[in-house]
Amino acid sequence: MFRQRYFWHSSNDRYVLFVAEFFLRRTNRTTVERNLPAFIERFPDADSLIESSGEETVDVARWAGLRSRTMRLPEVTRLFMERSYWTAEQLLDLPYIGEYAAHALTLYIFNQPSFPIDNNVNRVLTRYLDLETESEKAAAVTRLREYTCSLHGVNGLKLVHMGLLALGWDHCRSSAKCTDCPLRGLCAYNDQPLGAARG
């Protein structure tokens, strides 16, 4: 399943999801996948991380290459765990939490119908629907979110989001691999004159 591509996708632990999204903002998913389990083993819960020193956290997460950010991770984790519920807008007020992480945390932890858009999701939707402007993209995301939630609820929205991420990782890359894409017969990008060569 798409949700199990990386171990944090199948986690229900808000602490694990938070730490994963914190690092994923500036560290590629392969590096996080390889190193995050050891980090979680050293800091198995929020309290253990919050009580650590910034220097200790940096030492355990040297693989991330984010000294100044990692130094503040115990503090940011404390702020996050102090509240039982956050909106995406509120999460944006936390240090080092960007737009994607805020919406991802809102969707996957707090089960609200946010729709996180990174470069992968943006690329898939732009090509599949032949979108050109930011307003077209925003309208398409709104329609997708509302339609999916009306049929399948927030859990369905999570699966759709994970599916789009997987398409971006595996097929709809900067240099598109259209040949084996499951959406090939429906995609506007593949129907363009150069579509056959793009595979």
Image (cartoon, grey):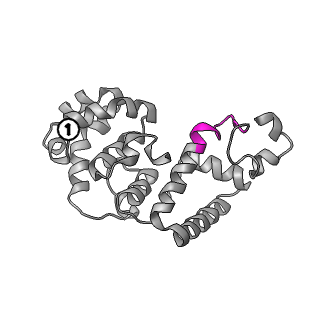
Residue 13 in the figure: left or right of residue 193: left
Give the residue at mark 1.
Answer: 43
| Percent position of residue 50, x then y | 17, 45
Relative height, residue 7 to residue 147 (above, below): above
Q: Secondary structure at mark 1?
A: loop
Residue at the far right: name it. Answer: 193
Q: Position of residue 13 (x, y in %)?
A: 28, 51
36 shown above or below 18? above
Name the image quarter holding residue 91. Answer: bottom left
Q: Which residue: 40% across, 55% down? A: 102
Tell me if residue 33 can be seen: yes
- Rate crowding at label 1 as few (under 14), some (14 to 19) or many (20 or more) other CA atoms within 10 Å: some
Q: Is residue 168 magenta?
A: yes
Report whether 128 appears left or right of 43: right
- Position of residue 100 measured from the top left corner of the image (x, y, whole percent): 46, 51
Q: Give the residue drawn at x 55%, y 50%.
A: 163
Q: Position of residue 99 (x, y in %)?
A: 45, 53
Residue interval drawn in magenta: 167-178
Q: Quadrant of residue 69 in the image?
A: top left
Does residue 131 appear anywhere in the picture?
no
Asked if residue 135 is positioned above or below residue 130 in the image, the reply reads: below
The residue under the point 15% across, 36% down is 53
Q: Residue at x 63, y 37 (%)?
A: 173
What residue occupies the far left of the structure in this picture?
51
Asked whether residue 10 is drawn in magenta, I would say no
Q: Amino acid at mark 1?
A: Phe
- Tell me: 121 left or right of 91: right
Where is the C terminus found, in terms of image quarters? top right
- Name the chief secondary structure element in magenta: loop
